[in-house]
Image (cartoon, grey):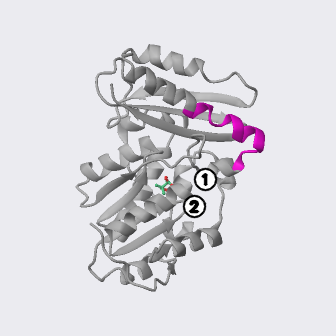
Amino acid sequence: MCRPRPQPVVLEQIETIAALRSRLTHGGAVGLVPTMGALHAGHVALIDAARRDSDLVVASIFVNPLQFNNADDLARYPQTLDADLSVCRDRGVDLVFTPSAAEMYPQPPECTVDVGRMADNLCGKYRPGHFRGVATIVLKLFQIVQPRFAYFGQKDAQQLAIIKRLTTDFNLPIGIVEVPTVREPDGLALSSRNRHLNAEERKIAVSLYVALTHAATMIREGARSAELIRRAAVDLVPQTAGLRLEYLEIVDPNTMQPLMEVDGPVCIAGAMWVGATRLIDNVLAVP
Ligand code: PAF
């Protein structure tokens, strides 16, 4: 579906739920791009996909405190609102929703989304409560914006799988559109956190992608034991000071549950600390 975009586009920034709701009464197909700001080319790919499908594109920029299990990580999360607004303007976003924490959480929520076992491993294991926070804010944004489509990156594979399941389990009439990971020329996945890397860290940050793609190659070439593939990939991560692999797992791409044998499409996912920066990435592999 490709709809011509009305010209000229004037970007509207809206900070309250009431103002956004009263603005969203025109009846066309709304595409929602939920973000935490610090926009990069990965977000641009989400916005461009939304622009292709929707009459009205809404991007939200909200650093959601409920999904941070570590206060330092929240404090350190990059905030670049002016630059983000100009990215949105350049890419033809119609409305940017920039609520405050008090607007989204006027009181600490009593009711949150219990994600269940999809949040038990991978990032969920190392960031307790993270996916409860993600699923809760995404459900709130869906309720507020009521989009026809919402756009998420494949880079956050566990988040994407959980959000797809959220829409199924709660019968939400929203199409979840997944957009491929955007990478630097050496393969490093774009992430808002990459801006924390110094030059030395930036060079070694690609090791996670190298390990993940090695596992994918083994699968394409016939390896089937998830543990053997996993170990070979882990062994490839250099024992360099400042680099620490948190996890590297082979999981079912829909349920995020670990696999013993590769007998269908798999997601190979990992998280790695590079200095004080935690990076995640994943690749899909088909035997
Ligand atoms: O992927 C993100 O940036 C966030 O987890 C999301 C989906 C915007 C929810 O805060």
Read off the residue under disc 1: 192
- In this view, 255 is above or below 232: below
Residue 162 % position (x, y) = 37, 45
Is 201 magenta? The answer is: yes
Read off the residue under disc 2: 39
Q: Residue at x 52, y 39 (%)?
A: 281
Q: Amino acid at mark 1?
A: Ser
Q: Which residues are magenta?
A: 196-209
Residue 199 in which image quadrant: top right
Distance in Å between CA atoms under marks 1 and 2: 7 Å
Structural crowding at the residue carrying mark 1, measured as other residues with C-alpha within 10 Å and reported as few (<14), some (14–19) or many (≥20): some
Front-most of 67 and 59? 59
Give yes or no for contact between labels 1 and 2 (Cβ–Cβ under 8 Å): yes
Residue 40 % position (x, y) = 57, 58
- In this view, 166 is above or below 253: below
Query: Which quadrant is the N terminus positioned in?
Result: bottom left
Asked if residue 64 can be seen in this view, the reply is no
